[in-house]
Image (cartoon, rainbow, N blue to C red):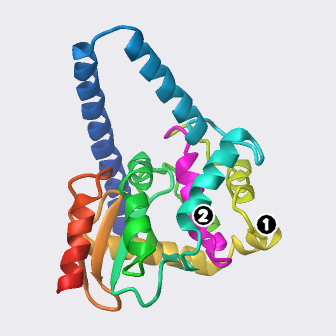
Amino acid sequence: MSSAENEEDLTRKQRREQARADRKAIEEASAADAARRKRLTRLGVVVAVVVAAVVVILIATSGGGSTPPKKGSTGAKHVEKEVTTLLAGIPQSGASLGSSKAPVTLQYYGDLECPICKKFTLGALSSLIQHWVREGKLRIEYRNLETATREPETFKSQQAAALAAGTQAKLWNYIETFYHEQGTEDSGYVTEQYLRGIAEQVPGLNLAKWTSERTKPEYASQIESDAQAANAAGFNGTPSFLIGHTGGATKTLEYSSLEDPSSFNNAIEQQLKA
């Protein structure tokens, strides 16, 4: 391996470590803020009821364990219904969601194990899909950038699993299901059993074809190409975004919240007016 390649690998490793450190800092700050709010909250029956309700919802709608809910289980059915309803009738092509004639394109750089990406998926993204994508004004392209996944080979395997679903126009069903059922970071939950468990929950996905296509070399090339594009854009964390007119130049989208879609809506509206 040449010194240039060594330097590039070192740069990527440093970027991943920096992104992980930044994300941990954000999570610690959020935890501290939550603790302060909790001290100010009255204790009592009402709080107990609310907390219990939240726990029930989280168990029903999200992951956090080492394996996804089994197909046919209550948790799996809930996620499948939510994802199917969100994406129903919207065209998919490879890693893209939305009409090819949409005037605006949003490139979304993500890591399937990134908990901040999950926050975006369960927050602002749903609104963007329902409002802009479904109306044919926005096309979203999912790009791959390793930040949260500790092992490069695991990252390649999980992202290739999503790309393989994309050959059947099911990539967005796969990544939405993955984010909904995402496990605990750094727990090593992403195994072959886990990836197949996600695939089994994607309605209409031909599992035999999905399995045989996961090792195609073009997926590794796509993942590498996405990493290079992210590096050129100066991205060192996920989620990160580029926005622009479809087929034209793009620029970084700066957001104020991953749960409130307002900053994304403003950026889209500016592109439509330009």
- Residue 199 visible in the shown view: yes
Q: Nearer the viewer, residue 67 or 201?
A: 201
Viewer-nearest of discs 1 and 2: 2
User: What residue type is disc 1 on?
Assistant: Leu
User: Residue 85 location in percent, x, y?
Assistant: 58, 61
Q: Is residue 62 above or below residue 3?
A: above
Where is residue 140, by image quadrant?
bottom left
Q: Is residue 185 above or below residue 160?
A: above
Looking at the image, tell me whether mark 1 or mark 2 is earlier in sequence order. 2
User: What residue type is disc 2 on?
Assistant: Asn
Our reading of the magenta stretch's main secondary structure is: helix
Marks 1 and 2 in Cβ contact (< 8 Å): no
Where is residue 110, by image quadrant?
bottom left
Q: Is residue 176 magenta?
A: yes
User: Residue 204 location in percent, x, y?
Assistant: 75, 68
Q: Is residue 128 magenta?
A: no
The kind of secondary structure element at disc 1 is helix
Instruction: Please give the residue where the numbered disc 2 appears in the rendered image.
Output: 173
Which range of residues does the magenta coloring cover? 162-185
Count how many numbered circles sit on residues in the image.
2
Res. 268 mark: none
Instruction: Please give the residue where the numbered disc 1 appears in the rendered image.
Output: 207
